[in-house]
Image (cartoon, coloured by chain):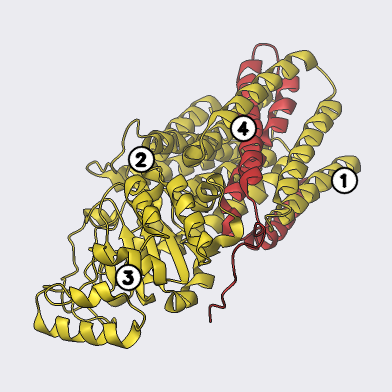
Chain colours: A yellow, B red
Amino acid sequence: MAVTIFFAALVIVAFLIGIRLMQSPHTALWGNRLGALAMIFAIIWTFIATGRGSFSLALIYIATGSVIGLVLGQSVRMIHMPQTVALLNGFGGAASALVVWSAVLGYAGEGAEMLFWGTSGLALGIGVLTFSGSVIAVLKLQGIAFRKPIQIIGHGHILRIAILLAVLLIIFNMGFLGLYFGQFMTLIALLGLLAGFFMTLRIGGADMPIVISLLNSFSGIAAAVAGLAVENLILVGTGALVGVAGLILTRIMCRAMNRSLLAVLAGFTPGAHEKTLPAAGSTPSPKPDTGTPTEAGKAESTTAENTGTETEKPEEDLEEAAPADKISEKDLPGLLKNAARVIIVPGYGMAVAQAQIAVRQLLDALEEQGKDVKFAIHPVAGRMPGHMNVLLAEAGIDYDKLVDIDTINPQFAHADLVIVVGACDVVNPAANAAEGTPISGMPILEAEKAKNIIICNLDEQPGYSGVDNLLYEQPHVVTLWGDAAQTIPRLTAMIGKE
Amino acid sequence: MLYAMIIILLAAALLGYRVISAVPPLLHTPLMSGMNALSGITVIGALAVFTAAPEGSGGWAAAALVLAMINVAGGFWVTERMLRMFRGGKREGEVKEIPWQ
């Protein structure tokens, strides 16, 4: 007993130190390796401690799983990381469900306690839910099926009833102490599958970071509860760690989108709503009306702004100032030449366009001119927490150029130029300016405050939220519609030429 | 055993909360895939029930072993690959630092 506790504590402390090392990119690699080492140790220790039965057979299964896992891990591309993690989550959840399932078959009729029956029912339900939810998430992310959020009639009711019934059955399973366990457990498993399916079915693309974090948490909770059922301390502690990590990330993601977890799970997809934002009358922002571009009032105040804040602006701008007061594509070479401080705002659109390498080349060209370039990373950029950082790191961009939202926001006001690549909602000032839109109150990257902005998005369509981007019409913004893999090289080509 | 389990559950959750909260957003994806690998710890539960399984009921536990091990190996390996890509430091000081404030 004492030995068991000692080794369990040892493994969990090793995991904790591993996570501690993950706090810095310098040491994170060793943190991960320490975790892997502790895992191998835990497996060997379990081999020794259980000490009977079919060793060689178990080894074959472990080797099989390892090979499949390594091949999978080696073959996936970074842009597919969200579905990879979702898939592995699903496997973890399913494994925990199977562990309690086979423990139940082993214990059946041996007069196990209430704790055993309660926790095994619970672990089965959560594990199975994690599995089916993850499978749907993978199908969505991979674009195989259910790409659009799907909501059937009575969706919420089905989900709630399934969960409620499953909870009742878990309680029954506990109360009956294994009587009818076969029926109870089968029903719990079916309801769990159903709940995971319906929970994920109506999730839209940009809400994926939240769901993946949540499923990650569930896979940990399933392991912890399974650990309670089979009385395994390492399982309990490690499962709790994963559960907490998933919950922390879920909370961070929800905050970054200003959405409540319940709203996401309840299938409140903002895109489905009416565009509640009228173009005019919603602008506490310093810029004039976003309404019709021909308005006289707009022309005046814009001119004032141009002369006021942009003293070193290229002369091309003054030449063609008359009808279109907005800066245009003609001004791009001048903008790029005169900017000393540049912030690039990448969004998932950049990844979809496979424009990371193009962005890297743009960065190199800008730095060659002695410009200071940083990347502003919104927490929900991408399809899982921190996804954008990985995509940019893959393109060979140093991580010390990747700056998070809180650090970069005060710097926008000092930036000469912001280049937005495939990002919409995360730079939309409507989040601050307008009430009652799906993104109102969502923390955004304050690109608006920069002197000039170049937007390289695919088209004028609003982002996931369905809210029109107030930036597009502003006078200090140039929009460059089209595939970022083509528009970004155009910008790069302009640098260094007059 | 019950007390030991409850204590370890709470301790892991509390300490985990502190350590995990301090991981910067930069590393959230590797953090998640690493934690994902840890959730494959259920492999040791699978191992225990597999070796203890009565005749003919080892199939479920065997499936659990394979699935959990895919989770462990895949999770740690993608995390390793990702973290190898994270490079820092200015190269040959070609970039002039300009004060931002």
Tell me how far mark 4 sits from mark 1, CA to CA.
Answer: 28 Å
Q: Residues within 10 Å of mark 4 (few under 14, many from 20)?
A: many
Does label 3 lie on the same chain as label 4? no
Q: Which residue is mark 3?
A: A431
* Residue that mark 2 sits on: A198
Image quadrant occupied by the N terminus of chain A: top right
Q: Is residue A291 above or below residue B65?
A: below
Residue occupying the point 32% across, 32% down: A145
Viewed as shown, does residue B23 lie left or right of A20?
Answer: left
Q: Pointers 3 and 2 in contact (CB under 8 A)?
A: no
Looking at the picture, tell me which residue is in the foreground, A27 or B100. Answer: B100
Q: CA distance from mark 4 to mark 3?
A: 39 Å
Relative to A68, say whether A202 is above or below.
below
Q: Which quarter of the rendering shows the C terminus of chain A?
A: bottom left
Image mark 1: chain: A
Q: How packed is label 3: few (under 14 Cα within 10 Å), some, or many (20 or more)?
A: many
